[in-house]
Structure formats: C-alpha cells, structure tokens
Image: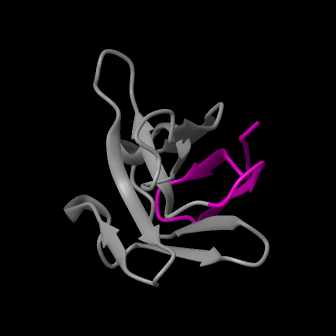
Amino acid sequence: QVQLVESGGGFVQAGGSLKLSCKGSGGMFSDMGWYRQTPGQQRELVATATSGGSATYAEFVKNRFTISRNLGKNTVDLEMRDLKPEDTAVYFCHALQRWMSSGGEHWGQGTQVTISS
C-alpha cells in the first residue's frame, strides 16, 4: 500500500523560507512532486520531478522554489524561499506510477503553509 507522508509546513512571514519534505513508501514512482490548493480553488501544480532528473515548475514559483528527489530514500523535497502571502495554501505531495494503467496516482494528506504579510 502506497503512503506519502509530508512534513515541514508552517507559518512564516513574507520573504521567509520553508522546506517541505515527503517520504513515499509501498512503491517506486516515476514522478514525485507538489501541488497546492486554496479554499474554493482547484489543486494546482507547484513542481514535479521525474526519476530521470527532469523538473517542471509552475510559472509562479520559478526562481523561488527548488524541488529535489532522492531516489534511494524515495523522498521529494521542496525548498521554498522569498515566500509571498499568495503562496498560502495546503501543499500536497503527489506521486505517479506511469506504468500502471489505473491506480497509479497517489496523494499525501496535505500540509498547511501560511505566509503573513
């Protein structure tokens, strides 16, 4: 059974930094990354990284956030700096098993990130 356990959310002032971490268990993943969601809005991609080392970032976090994966530990981290109030959201770890025709998408429970102005 796949599990994704997140840590590292919290409350910081604008301009500050936070690091989110996610550890996967119960499987290997082609892609691991982070999405975020605010009340009444759809979940949106923040950043994702493939097992081959390619990373994709949402335009609104480029040059501020850095995603990194450790394949051996099955973890994905998101270093966030220069945080803005609009970054406030619940951040979800996401993992994908592309080789599975169904049931290959997994989510963590979410961690709250709050940025004060």
Query: Is 103 above or below relative to 71?
Result: above
Quadrant (top left/top right/bottom left/bottom right) for the N terminus: top right
Q: What type of secondary structure mainly makes up the magenta span?
A: strand
Looking at the image, which residue is at 51% across and 33% down? 103
Which portion, as a residue range, is magenta?
A: 1-28
Residue 80 lies, in percent from the top left, at 52, 66
Q: Nearer the viewer, residue 112 or 45?
A: 45
Q: In the image, is residue 8 part of the stretch drawn in magenta? A: yes
**Picture mark count:** 0
Q: How far across and down, in percent of the image, does residue 47 sit?
A: 39, 62
Q: Quadrant of residue 60?
A: bottom left
From the viewer's perspective, tell me whether residue 102 is left or right of residue 2.
Answer: left
Q: Is residue 90 magenta?
A: no
For residue 36, what is the image quadrant? top left
Q: Residue furthest top?
A: 40
88 left or right of 11 in image: left
User: In the figure, 7 relative to 102: above or below?
Assistant: below
In the picture, residue 79 is in which quadrant?
Answer: bottom right
Q: Residue furthest left?
A: 59
The percent position of residue 75, horizontal first and vertical second, equals 70, 65
* Colour setup of the view: one colour
In the image: residue 11, left or right of residue 46:
right
Please provide percent x and percent y for residue 76: 63, 65
Q: Is residue 117 visible?
A: no
Pick whichever, 30 or 81, lies toward us.
30
Q: Is residue 30 above or below residue 66?
A: above
Farthest residue, direction bottom: 53
Q: Which residue occupies 63% across, 67% down?
A: 77
Q: Is residue 27 visible?
A: yes
The residue drawn where x is 72% and y is 66% is 74
